[in-house]
Image (cartoon, rainbow, N blue to C red):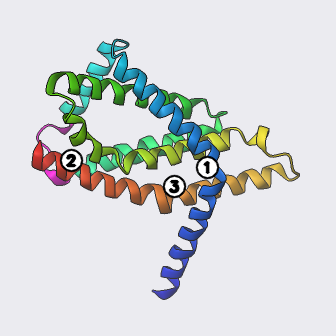
Amino acid sequence: MQAGENIVYRNFKESVRYLKKIKRHFWISLILFFGFGLFGFIFPVFFVEQVRQMIEEIIKQTAGLSTLGLIRFIIFNNVKSAFFGLIFGLFFAIIPLGILIINGYVLGFVASKSASSEGLLILWRLLPHGILEIPAVLISVALGIRLGTFLFIYQGKNKWKEFKKWIWDSLKVFLFIVIPLLVIAGIIEGVLIGVVG
């Protein structure tokens, strides 16, 4: 048991250290996400039908779920979205950037519509839902962007060996940092929705 605990702790520490290497990519992700979030909040007029259908589909999928079922649904969807942001970064970071832009815009869109119908105070109720979820997804996207720009960043020898190391380090961050954050976020969000509706 002690050996297992040491492995987990060691990998967690290595994952935290690796976060320093994606600091620039994280800030790029953060700026893009909130930039498009602000755009969606100020101009909630684009892709109205698509966003409405997306929200209706989520409502349909979560209708009648217990709090535990809702938590499972939220965690699964967030982990899947975050993993896509990481793994599809291999394709020159195009897909992670698309995920950022779409999710940022949708968040701003929903916040704008909620504020216009229920007042700005509704945003304080929405805030706890994303306080851990958004950083976790942004970390995954930052990892994906770093992987997608490997050929432009890394100038040393043994490129394939180094690239495999980048992938392995990224997966460790995903496993030991991103997933725990998303699990906690899913529990908070599921309980809040279950309690306050």
* Residue beneath disc 3: 174
* Residue beneath disc 1: 23
Q: Dot 1: what SS?
A: helix
Is residue 65 a member of the stretch shown in magenta?
yes
User: Outermost residue toward the front?
Assistant: 120
Q: Earlier in the sequence, mark 1 or mark 2?
A: 1
User: Vertically, is 181 above or below 1?
Assistant: above
Q: Nearer the viewer, residue 39 or 99?
A: 39
Query: Could you tell me which quadrant the C terminus lies in?
Result: top left
Residue bounds of the magenta highlight: 60-68
Q: Quadrant of residue 144?
A: top right
**Residue positioned 48% across, 87% down in the render:** 2
* Residue beneath disc 2: 70
**Is 51 situated left or right of 32 in this image?**
left
User: Vertically, is 26 above or below 13?
Assistant: above
Q: Earlier in the sequence, mark 2 or mark 3?
A: 2
**Residue positioned 22% across, 30% down in the render:** 120
Residue 115: x %, y % from top left: 22, 27
Q: Dot 3: what SS?
A: helix
